[in-house]
Image (tube, helix red, strand yellow):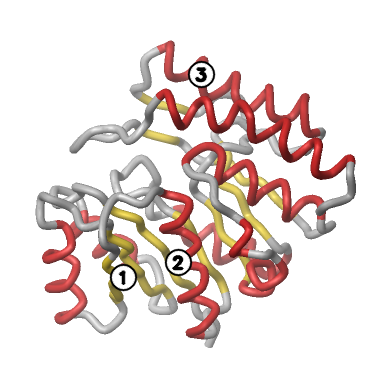
């Protein structure tokens, strides 16, 4: 039976983790969860350990501190490859991503190499964001497409599903970016390898509990990343 791992990076997500993990596992018996916790001060890591002790489909990686979203996913990717998982998903811990979409990922990923849950494939499907945040996100997506030529309408989205073979084709140790930038870099490298990418529509809902991890540094990194990727492609380093 094919297996799917959902990687959930956490930092201060104590309010959400138990409910979210239960909803993820309820979608399909093939699904497992990997929590990658960055030593959350609010005790998220302890909650994750308790959930794992009670449910064999929940696994936990503890990291020494707040090391960033990108490195959390890379750690999860490597764990998934080592465990022989067939499909590997990225998912936020704050309920901005609907666990019900995981069924759509399971139905779609056998046909392609990467499925992206897109906020912008059928218009703008974002709920409860202030206009400034929406303009930043949509503008970043448009900016990325123009500079890199990558035909992905939501290149900064963080809800997606990979085949294990897709992750094995990437040099994970060469990926060091975080946040928006991480999503752009991974999508670009998958696209440049000629692998099959499909976007499916999702509705993104702003988090109800906890606080956003967005920062000016994350935005600046994404601005420069698109030019770095374009230059690397031009010089054949990919």
- The vertical placement of 179 against 24, above or below, is above
Q: Residue furthest top?
A: 131
Name which of mark 2 and mark 3 comes first in the sequence: 2
Q: Are marks 2 and 3 in contact (CB under 8 Å)?
A: no
Q: Are marks 1 and 2 in contact (CB under 8 Å)?
A: yes
Q: Is residue 121 left or right of residue 9?
A: right
For mark 2, what is the residue? Answer: 75
Q: Are marks 1 and 3 in contact (CB under 8 Å)?
A: no
Residue at (73%, 52%) from the top-left corner?
189
Name which of mark 1 and mark 2 comes first in the sequence: 1
For mark 1, what is the residue? Answer: 61
- Where is residue 101 shown, x and y percent of the image? 47, 53
- Where is residue 133 shown, x and y percent of the image? 43, 19
- State the residue in front, 180 or 110: 180
| Residue 136: numbered disc | 3
Mark 1, secondary structure of its residue: strand
- Where is residue 142 shown, x and y percent of the image? 68, 23
Q: Distance between the residues labelled 2 and 3?
A: 28 Å
Q: Residue furthest bottom?
A: 1
Give the foreground label among 2 and 3. Answer: 2
- The vertical placement of 100 against 5, above or below, is above
| Residue 125: numbered disc | none
Q: How many residues crowd around disc 1 within 10 Å: few (fewer than 14), some, or many (20 or more)?
A: some
């Amino acid at each position: 039976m094919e297996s799917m791992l959902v990687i959930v990076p956490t930092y201060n997500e104590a309010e959400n983790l138990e409910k979210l993990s239960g909803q993820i596992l309820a979608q399909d018996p093939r699904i497992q969860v990997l929590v990658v916790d960055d030593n959350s001060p609010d005790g998220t890591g302890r909650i994750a350990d308790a959930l794992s002790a009670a449910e064999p489909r929940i696994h936990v990686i503890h990291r020494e501190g707040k090391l960033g979203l990108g490195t959390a996913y890379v750690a999860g990717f490597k764990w998934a490859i080592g465990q022989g998982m067939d499909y590997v998903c990225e998912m936020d811990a704050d309920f901005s991503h609907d666990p019900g979409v995981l069924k759509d990922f399971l139905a779609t990923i056998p046909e392609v190499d990467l499925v992206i849950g897109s906020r912008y494939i059928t218009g703008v499907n974002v709920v409860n964001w202030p206009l400034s945040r929406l303009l930043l996100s949509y503008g970043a997506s448009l900016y990325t497409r123009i500079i890199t030529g990558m035909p992905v309408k939501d290149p900064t989205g963080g809800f997606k599903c990979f085949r294990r073979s897709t992750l094995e084709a990437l040099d994970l140790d060469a990926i060091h970016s975080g946040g928006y930038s991480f999503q752009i870099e991974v999508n670009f490298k998958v696209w440049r390898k000629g692998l099959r990418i499909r976007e499916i529509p999702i509705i993104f809902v702003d988090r109800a509990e906890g606080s956003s991890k967005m920062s000016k540094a994350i935005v600046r990194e994404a601005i420069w990343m698109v030019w770095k990727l374009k230059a690397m492609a031009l010089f054949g380093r990919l």
